[in-house]
Image: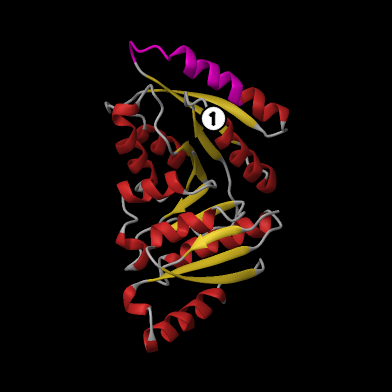
Amino acid sequence: MKDILCPTDLSETSLKGIQYADMLAAGLNSSVSLLHVMNKAESQGEARIAAKVKMDDQVSHVKQAPITCHFRDGEFMEEITRESRTGHAMMVCATHGSRGLRQSLFGTDILKLVRRVEVPSLVVQAHSGTPTSLGTIVMPVASHKEIDHLLNAVSMLASAFGSEVHIYQLNRPGEQPSEDLLANKKHMSEYLTKVGIRHMNVEDDETSFSIGFAVQTIAYADRIGAGCIAIMSMASDEYRYIADAEKERMLTNEPGIPVLCAR
């Protein structure tokens, strides 16, 4: 199994990403590649040495899987994207660090990163729960032609952790789901059946007004204690006009539910 790429800004928050990467690597019988991109202040002298000392401390928090460390100089988003092309299974990234990744990884910019990297990404937050297992995966129905990219990632994790997948559809009064959406819903179920992943179809009637789907999807995932929400990072043609705001809302959801993204 290819390893798990885990960018770190060496902050306390980034430890949450490292903990999740450790859990996933152990479950997948894999390893962790910890990546820190040096900013200008860390590029030389004592600051560079201090960064490596902090990296050593973060390495000590990986308890279950082998780990290797990588340092890069440059613009962090470019370097993370470049590293993602070198053969990793997926990326785990924590947001809201005090510096480093925090330079951009809020809202629109965390979305930019998961859209750029070449592998599926699990985005966690500072207040995401302590990782012990992945639990139920909530996968909202989407009309993307590339839905198999997400199904591949979901199946990989669900198989490793014995997770059940909830194929989630939000029903709105007076609004009929498109043919593309229904076709993908059927395909999602057939795909998961074929690869032996436990799953169920969930239809949820809208209970509060919202232009998009994120609010009620998050509420459902929180209500059932889901360990992960799985979404396509790119916009579908059907909801392109609201997609970015909806996906940002997912990635920064208030309960801190980890979000698996594929493009």
Task: Tell me, yes or no, whether the highlighted magenta stretch contains residue 179.
Answer: yes
Residue 85: horizontal and vertical position, in percent? Answer: 55, 52
Residue 115: horizontal and vertical position, in percent? Answer: 43, 44
- State whether the magenta stretch is mostly helix, strand or loop: helix
Relative to 234, residue 254 above or below: below
- Left or right, 219 with respect to 2, comes to left
Display colour scheme: secondary structure
Residue 134: horizontal and vertical position, in percent? Answer: 58, 49
Residue at the (52%, 47%) spot, across then down: 118
Residue 230: horizontal and vertical position, in percent? Answer: 50, 39
How many numbered marks, from 0 up? 1
The residue lying toward the viewer, choosing from 125 and 243, is 243
The three-letter code of the residue at mark 1 reads: Ile
- The segment highlighted magenta reads 173-188
Residue density around tag 1, few if under 14, some if 14–19, many if 20 or more, within 10 Å: some
Residue at the (69%, 27%) spot, across then down: 193
The residue lying toward the viewer, choosing from 232 and 40, is 40
Task: Tell me, yes or no, whether the highlighted magenta stretch contains residue 28.
Answer: no
Q: Secondary structure at mark 1?
A: helix
Query: For the view shown, which residue lies furthest in the bottom direction?
Result: 46
Q: Quadrant of residue 76?
A: bottom left
| Residue on which disc 1 sits | 147
